[in-house]
Image (cartoon, rainbow, N blue to C red):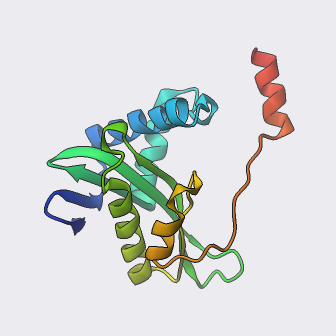
């Protein structure tokens, strides 16, 4: 089912089909290793990544953007109860990726718009996380408030595991 189309682009729910899951595995590997330079985000067992994507597509919310039938990006979010009030249904983005060939196009915006439009209609609270600060104006345009920033660092347990394998 298409959630958004503009005549050129289509944004739709991901399918639990082998080639679609494999594409998600390949693109998430590219995102972790080439864009973020953090290959540690990828499971050591490549089959595990496919299992995780299959679970996300089946149980949560994954959208794929296509242009003329060619996949160009995805956004994935978890559907979970709110931690303070479990009666509230929430949608939180976890990964948002646009393939290199589709950057500087409408792909990222259309993924965010479809994610937001679906969330507004189907959950009580939603959040969309940016990896970089470049999309602040777009987020405001989509109706989001800049409530908090996320800062990350690696924990000591990870550092000791990494040192042990070096």
Q: Residue at x 63, y 76 (%)?
A: 82
Q: How many numbered marks does the figure carry?
A: 0
Can you see residue 24? Answer: yes
State whether residue 21 is above or below residue 45: below
In the rendered image of this protein, does residue 103 appear above or below residue 165?
below
Report which quarter residue 165 is drawn in: top right
Looking at the image, which residue sits at the far top? 166
Name the residue at 77% across, 44% down.
153
Who is closer to the viewer here, 94 or 53?
A: 94
Q: Position of residue 155 (x, y in %)?
A: 82, 41
Q: Is residue 150 left or right of residue 72?
A: right
Where residue 119 appears, as percent x and y from the top left, is 43, 75
The answer to whether residue 14 is seen in the rendering is no
The residue at 69%/69% (across/down) is: 148
Question: Measured from the top left, where is residue 5 in percent x and y?
Answer: 20, 65
Q: Quadrant of the C terminus?
A: top right
In the rendered image, residue 65, in percent from the top left (x then y), is placed at 29, 54
On screen, residue 124 versus residue 63, left or right, reads right
The residue positioned 50% from the left and 68% from the top of the image is: 137
* Figure quadrant of residue 6: bottom left
Q: Is residue 155 left or right of residue 8?
A: right
The quadrant of the picture occupied by the N terminus is bottom left
């Amino acid at each position: 089912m298409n959630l958004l189309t503009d005549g050129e682009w289509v944004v739709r729910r991901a399918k639990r089909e082998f080639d679609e899951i494999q594409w998600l595995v390949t693109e998430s590997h590219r995102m972790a290793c080439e864009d973020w330079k953090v290959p540690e985000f990828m499971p050591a067992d490549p089959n595990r990544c496919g299992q995780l994507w299959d679970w996300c597509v089946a149980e949560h919310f994954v959208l794929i953007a296509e242009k003329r039938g060619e996949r160009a990006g995805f956004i994935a979010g978890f559907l979970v109860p709110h931690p303070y009030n479990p009666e509230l249904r929430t949608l939180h983005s976890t990964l948002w990726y646009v393939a290199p060939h589709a950057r500087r196009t409408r792909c990222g915006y259309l993924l965010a718009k479809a994610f937001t439009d679906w969330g507004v209609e189907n959950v009580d609270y939603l959040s969309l996380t940016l990896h970089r600060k470049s999309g602040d104006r777009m987020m405001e345009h989509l109706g989001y408030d800049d409530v908090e920033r996320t800062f990350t660092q690696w924990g000591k347990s990870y550092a000791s595991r990494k040192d042990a394998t070096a």
